[in-house]
Image (cartoon, rainbow, N blue to C red):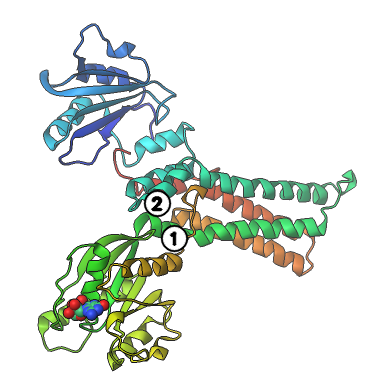
């Protein structure tokens, strides 16, 4: 339970070795706790008198003993992350000193912070909206720079801005409708049908845009699990090494060299990939290889993107056909490799790829330029190429579900119009849409929704 009278503390930097570790204190007694723990090097300086946005150098005490050097940063309510009095104490990184500093703060009267409690206080004190709080966690977890930029835009309120504009339009419509329906004697002008239809369609389209961007945004932030798959010796490991930029996997002309999964995170074009090079799929009596193939199959099922590699310089085999058929309905790119060896076009019967893949690219994995060729195909397929990180995007399943509910309610309103229902019915659908949007932005969000959002936070944030 959130108790704003408590003063909380936690390590705000990751545990383990590092240059510095930061322990954050927040709450009404942040200054008194800091005063018990921290001794300024200049005895004339007093913690209690420290102004906001200033720093003091000194050391901290644990059980009366002088410990590590510390820089203390002071923030005065409401001008801090949480909106409360905050003191951030930085000591040297490493478990011993950082843990000692947390202990000293606890002994001096602070309580350990719960997961996400600093951010939750910021929400509670009106320092940020729920979508901005979610963005904080996305920034922490972002895999690539574009993904972090996307989350940062949201922290700045870009998503809230986009939703707010839709909300404002719908609220205006809803109030006009309500006035017209509820006060027939008041001479409220009737909404022009064309204007009503256009406004409904426009809001629905804007929500659809947000929904469409969700997948690409999630890919930007967390990367997409990608399986490189194909029969032995087509060049899977060569492709992985090309994408990784170094010799990640062993490449030999001997079929069956890659027996286990090899994992590698790479940035390809705009898209972060979590790549899995897999054992070549083939029948085998070798138990180790068979286990590798079992794992490859599992990765294939779980992957969000499949790079199916074929040897374009040789006729297709039965295994190639089977692989192509398995890729049907999946997000998959066919990579026709060994372009440099392809003596005559048509050696590999490309008709077997038709209808099974979203994209087909022809390249030589041994040529550095092949990286760009594949990057273009991946970016366009994943939708990461056209996504503007500054525009703001939905960033959680919770937000997605609310946006979908709002869109569906608007579609319902348009259907009600098409079916000739009266404006009462349209008004009901509009109210549903507005309620869903309020859930999205966190206005009127119940305790349960907020708990759900914060359950994924880490301590110290
Ligand atoms: P994997 O079993 O599918 O992982 O295949 P490898 O990456 O181990 O490659 C098998 C053989 O094909 C190796 O001798 C590679 O050097 C060769 N190879 C891979 N890609 C190309 C290519 O684009 N052109 C040529 N000429 N050889 C390639």
x%, y% of residue 59? 17, 20
- 129 left or right of 349? right
- Residue 297 in sight: no
Decide: is 136 above or below 260: above
Proximity of marks 1 and 2: CB atoms separated by less than 8 Å: yes
x%, y% of residue 461? 33, 39
Q: Nearer the viewer, residue 132 or 246?
A: 246
Q: CA distance from mark 1 to mark 2?
A: 9 Å
x%, y% of residue 397? 45, 57
Q: Nearer the viewer, residue 247 or 82?
A: 247
Circle 2 — which element?
A: helix
- Residue 11 in sight: yes
Q: Nearer the viewer, residue 460 or 354?
A: 354
Rate crowding at label 2 as few (under 14), some (14 to 19) or many (20 or more) other CA atoms within 10 Å: many
Q: Could you say which disc has been placed on residue 384 in the image? A: 1
Residue farthest along the top direction in this orientation: 44
Q: Could you say which disc has been placed on residue 146 in the image? A: 2
At horizontal 43% and vertical 24% (from top left) the residue drawn is 79
At horizontal 38% and vertical 54% (from top left) the residue drawn is 221
Decide: is 284 above or below 306: below
The picture quadrant for ligand 1 comes to bottom left
Circle 1 — which element?
A: loop
Total numbered labels placed on residues in the image? 2
- The image quarter containing residue 417 is bottom right
x%, y% of residue 78? 44, 24
Earlier-in-chain disc, 1 versus 2: 2
Quadrant holding the N terminus: top left
At horizontal 46% and vertical 55% (from top left) the residue drawn is 398
Rate crowding at label 1 as few (under 14), some (14 to 19) or many (20 or more) other CA atoms within 10 Å: many
């Amino acid at each position: 339970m959130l108790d704003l009278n408590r003063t909380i503390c936690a390590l705000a930097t990751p545990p383990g070795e590092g240059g510095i570790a930061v322990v954050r204190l927040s709450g009404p007694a942040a200054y008194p706790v800091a005063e018990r723990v921290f001794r300024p090097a200049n005895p004339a300086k007093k913690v209690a008198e420290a102004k906001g946005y200033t720093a003091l150098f000194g050391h901290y005490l644990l059980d009366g003993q002088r410990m590590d050097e510390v820089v203390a940063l002071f923030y005065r309510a409401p001008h801090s992350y949480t909106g409360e009095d905050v003191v951030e104490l930085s000591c040297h990184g490493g478990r011993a000193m950082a843990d000692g500093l947390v202990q000293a703060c606890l002994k001096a009267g602070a309580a350990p912070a719960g997961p996400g409690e600093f951010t939750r206080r910021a929400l509670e004190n009106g320092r940020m909206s729920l979508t901005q709080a979610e963005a904080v966690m996305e920034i922490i977890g972002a895999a690539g720079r574009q993904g972090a930029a996307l989350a940062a835009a949201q922290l700045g309120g870009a998503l809230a801005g986009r939703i707010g504009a839709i909300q404002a339009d719908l609220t205006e419509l809803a109030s006009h409708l309500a006035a017209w329906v509820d006060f027939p004697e008041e001479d409220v002008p009737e909404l022009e049908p064309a204007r009503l239809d256009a406004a409904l369609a426009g809001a629905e389209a804007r929500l659809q845009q947000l929904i469409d961007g969700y997948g690409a945004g999630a890919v930007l932030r967390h990367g997409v699990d990608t399986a490189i798959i194909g029969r032995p010796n087509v060049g899977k490991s060569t492709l992985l090494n090309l994408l990784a930029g170094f010799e990640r996997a062993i490449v030999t002309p001997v079929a069956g060299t890659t027996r286990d999964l090899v994992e590698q995170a790479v940035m390809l074009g705009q898209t972060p990939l979590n790549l899995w090079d897999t054992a070549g799929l083939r029948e085998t009596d070798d138990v180790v290889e068979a286990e590798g193939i079992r794992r490859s199959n599992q990765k294939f099922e779980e992957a969000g993107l499949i790079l199916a590699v074929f040897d374009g310089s040789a006729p297709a085999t039965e295994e190639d056909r089977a692989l192509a058929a398995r890729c049907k309905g999946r997000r998959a790119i066919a990579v026709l490799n060994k372009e440099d060896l392809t003596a005559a076009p048509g050696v590999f019967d490309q008709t077997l790829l038709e209808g099974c893949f979203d994209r087909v690219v022809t390249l030589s994995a041994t040529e550095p330029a092949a990286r760009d060729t594949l990057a273009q195909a991946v970016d366009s397929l994943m939708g990461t190429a056209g996504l503007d990180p500054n525009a703001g995007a939905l960033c959680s399943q919770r937000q997605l579900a609310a946006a979908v509910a709002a869109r569906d309610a608007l579609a319902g309103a348009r259907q009600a119009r098409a079916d000739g229902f009266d404006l009462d019915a349209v008004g009901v659908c509009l109210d549903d849409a507005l309620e869903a949007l309020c859930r999205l932005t966190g206005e009127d969000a119940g305790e349960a929704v907020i708990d759900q959002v914060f359950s994924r936070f880490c301590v110290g944030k």
